[in-house]
Image (tube, rainbow, N blue to C red):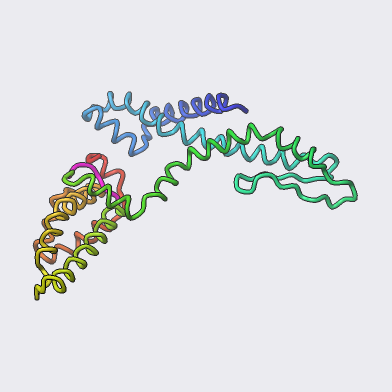
């Protein structure tokens, strides 16, 4: 089955699901909240926006699901290519083609015959593999988001208090500020002989890191649906306890929508 045919099936299934949700008013929470926000609270207008928003969310998911089913079908076909059960052929994304030796006394496939089997299915399998690669782009990108990525991101949003920040973004930057503070503390003691450890190095680093620390804290609170002003709880001392709990809380896509 070609990609265009799968896309048509995905569009049809998406339309059926969205129509059913509208008829039953069984809206998907995140899509409905986005629709209401776009329609300024007007439910009738929101239903119109819901069609586009929900359809965009669903169609890729359904399309990838269909491609997965197509891959399973192809693997089953490959397993059936045995010519009187003299040879079993398998294919996987990771290992490629594998030819299992026959348990019978029949002669095994020649290299040429193996190549013919590969060529027969390779074009279709390339489409499947390409689709899964696109579907995994997000996962691969997240894997590339390491320590240096988050530090650069926080400095890139030096005084940006709008938007949201993930738990990883906040805590990696907090770890970075802790390392810098400790380094400056020891530099002040051993190079400038400041007894308290809070000299010129600590002062400069504190001034540089103050705004990005406050801004990423505000965005992290936005990510769980809370105002960035809750950071002022740190002034009370005891308020650090709920503040740390909030900063370590997982993203809440239902509550953070108003800050996106």
Q: Looking at the picture, tell me which residue is in the foreground, 15 or 230.
A: 230
Is 142 placed left or right of 252 in the picture? right
> Is residue 60 shown above or below 236?
above
In the picture, which quadrant includes the C terminus?
top left
In the picture, which quadrant includes the N terminus?
top right
Is 21 placed left or right of 117 in the picture? left
Q: What segment carries the magenta color?
A: 161-166
Horizontal and vertical percent for residue 97?
A: 69, 44
> Is residue 172 shown above or below 38?
below
Q: Residue furthest bottom?
A: 195
Is 191 placed left or right of 103 in the picture? left
Does the magenta portion include 73?
no
Q: Main secondary structure of the magenta part?
A: loop
Does the magenta portion include 163?
yes
Horizontal and vertical percent for residue 259?
A: 22, 41
Horizontal and vertical percent for residue 257?
A: 26, 40
> How many tags in the picture?
0
Is 129 placed left or right of 146 in the picture? right
The residue that appears at 29% across and 27% down in the rendered structure is 46
Horizontal and vertical percent for residue 159?
A: 16, 45
The residue that appears at 40% across and 34% down in the rendered structure is 57
The answer to which quarter of the image holds residue 182 is: bottom left
Q: Residue furthest right?
A: 105
Q: Residue furthest front?
A: 191
Q: Looking at the picture, tell me which residue is in the foreground, 81 or 130.
A: 130
The residue that appears at 24% across and 64% down in the rendered structure is 179
> Is residue 83 shown above or below 221?
above
């Amino acid at each position: 089955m070609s990609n265009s045919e799968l896309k048509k099936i995905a569009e049809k299934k998406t339309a059926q699901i969205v129509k059913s949700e509208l008829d039953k008013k069984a809206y998907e929470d995140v899509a409905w909240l986005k629709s209401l926000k776009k329609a300024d609270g007007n439910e009738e207008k929101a239903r119109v926006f819901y069609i586009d928003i929900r359809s965009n969310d669903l169609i890729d998911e359904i399309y990838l699901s269909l491609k997965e089913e197509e891959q399973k079908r192809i693997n089953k076909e490959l397993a059936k290519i045995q010519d009187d059960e003299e040879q079993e052929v398998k294919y996987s994304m990771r290992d490629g083609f594998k030819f299992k030796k026959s348990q019978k006394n029949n002669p095994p496939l020649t290299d040429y015959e193996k190549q013919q089997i590969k060529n027969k299915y390779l074009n279709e399998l390339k489409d499947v593999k390409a689709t899964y690669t696109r579907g995994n782009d997000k996962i691969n990108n997240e894997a590339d988001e390491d320590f240096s990525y988050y530090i650069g991101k926080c400095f890139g949003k030096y005084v940006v208090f709008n938007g949201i920040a993930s738990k990883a973004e906040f805590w990696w930057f907090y770890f970075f500020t802790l390392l810098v503070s400790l380094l400056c503390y020891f530099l002040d003691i051993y190079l400038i002989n400041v007894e308290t450890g809070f000299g010129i190095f600590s002062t400069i680093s504190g001034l540089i890191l103050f705004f990005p620390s406050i801004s990423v804290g505000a965005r992290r609170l936005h990510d769980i649906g809370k105002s960035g002003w809750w950071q002022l709880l740190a002034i009370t001392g005891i308020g650090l306890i709920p503040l740390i709990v909030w900063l370590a809380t997982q993203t809440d896509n239902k509550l953070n929508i108003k800050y996106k």
